[in-house]
Image (spheres, rainbow, N blue to C red):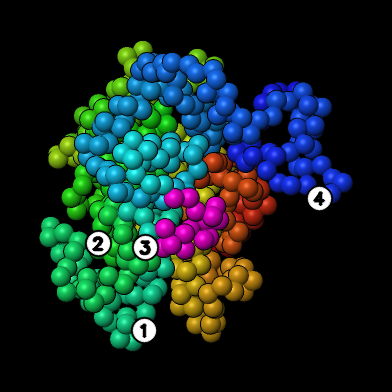
Amino acid sequence: MPVLKVVISMDPLDSAKPLPGTASAGVILRSFAQEKGILLYDWNEVEDIGAKHGRKHTPPSPSDIYTICYTSGTTGNPKGAVLSHGNMTAVLASGDCTTPWYPEDCLISFLPLPHVFGRIMEIFAFAIGGKIGYGTGDILNLLDDIAQLKPTVLPAVPRLLNRIYAKVSAATVEAPGVRGALSRRGFATKIANLKAGKGFEHPFWDRILFSKIKQALGGNIRVILTASAPISAEILGFIRVAFCCEVVEAYGQTEGSGAGTNTNIGELVAGHVGPPNTCAEIKLVDVPELDYYSTDKPSPRGEICVRGPGIIRGYLKDDVKTKETIDDEGWLHSGDIGVLSDNGTFSIIDRKKNVFKLSQGEYIAAESIEGKFLSRLPFIQQIFIHGDSSESCLVAILVPEPDAFVPFVNKVLKNINLRLGDLSALRAICEDPKLRKAVVHELLRAGQSAGLRSFELPKAVYLETEAFTVENDKLTPTFKIKRHPVIQAYRKHLDALYHEINSSNSKL
């Protein structure tokens, strides 16, 4: 262990009494540490050292390093964004203006702490003196963890909200008989009120229906904050009325300390990510290669650039990448394409990065397309859009969300009664050509409703029942798809999809 110098045990090292004729665990550990040249202390010893050698507290300056947060690394090595105390103070002050926190708040923390969103949420809770609860670490048990903790604040990514939507829908509006009829009427009434600007609460329906639904998230949720990817207006409205709570949608980047824009408390209109935070100014820069211009009418469009006290000074030991991302005037170039509405709110409509060409010369922004499908089809847990410069169309790898996909399967394949939880049967059925064709049809329908052009719609799909995870090297620690490893892992299936398409076209 050439690098490790000091180990601190949070438990006393000599508290356990050894069996007769044996050494205590503390003695064994200390002997091993001494042999390896490592200093070993328990927490009591650390406190004693501090008491004997006290040092005057030196408050940090705004320019001092607070932490190093790494970018997602979807297409290359992650970069270490150096966040200062000044950056974090600006973000805290800005967030408190739009989404106040209270000492009685309880936060469920499950997002990975390399993710700036997860880090910011914890800092808010610490700053106000609130509580933080940690789950079991198993994403499949997350809803049970939330129900047990009963938090008031839930930070969420759209993937989680899609799961919640699928589970609640299956148990309510899609349920048979009286329960389904009652649920459909209750949701219809509350969503109509929401669209009319009357809020997400209802004196009658909340008492007889939604007070029970709220218990799925513990019953105390007052605000859900969602970021990192787009979420559909339909699901956002559904979540608001189902759990009778605020849903704040935010947009930001690691390089901006997570601050960019967010919707305000009391916002009932979905489909945008709000105005700029108080610590950020935003401009749109022309992207001619994708035909986006800040002079577009009626609404300006272009690459979102952010400047303000939340922007980092640079990446750790990487001046080249710093200059590529942050210009001489301090503008952070996000790589995201936004549109500015008349009311001062922004919507994210495309992605400048991860753009590739098809054989006919059309540019494809894969992440943007994936986001549109994820926000419109609840049966999608994950989707990977792939194109090749030698091919004229797109294909997809799709991981279904079982709770929402099983009812879809039973509807398409009427002679099969697939049960929830039967993953081996689901895995076999995912190879069914009729089912795959039906999924492509749903992608076509959803894509057209999202305004995608014909060449942006996948012509074939491979259904994968094993989710992309950090452990299988298909996701980054911030839950973003690692594109190159996914292409390598599914090369055989991607080639087979193109062979299938080309064979079909040759018969026409």
Q: Which residue is mark 1?
A: 176
Q: Which residue is mark 2?
A: 244
Numbered label attached to residue 19 = 4
Which residue occupies the foreground of this view, 462 or 382?
382
Disc 1 residue crowd, few under 14, some 14–19, many 20+, Cα 10 Å: few
Residue 213 appears in which quarter of the rendering? bottom left
Mark yes or no: residue 397 visible: no
Q: Amino acid at mark 3?
A: Gly
Q: What residue is drawn where x is 36% and y is 12%?
A: 328
Mark yes or no: residue 246 visible: yes
* For residue 47, above or below residue 59: below
Please identify, in this view, whether the residue under mark 1 or under mark 3 is nearer the observer: 3
Which residue occupies the foreground of this view, 390 or 122?
122
Q: Earlier in the sequence, mark 1 or mark 2?
A: 1
Q: Earlier in the sequence, mark 4 or mark 3?
A: 4
Q: Amino acid at mark 1?
A: Pro
Magenta span covers which residues?
133-149
| Distance CA(mark 2)–CA(mark 3) | 12 Å
Question: Residue 212 vs residue 495: left or right?
Answer: left
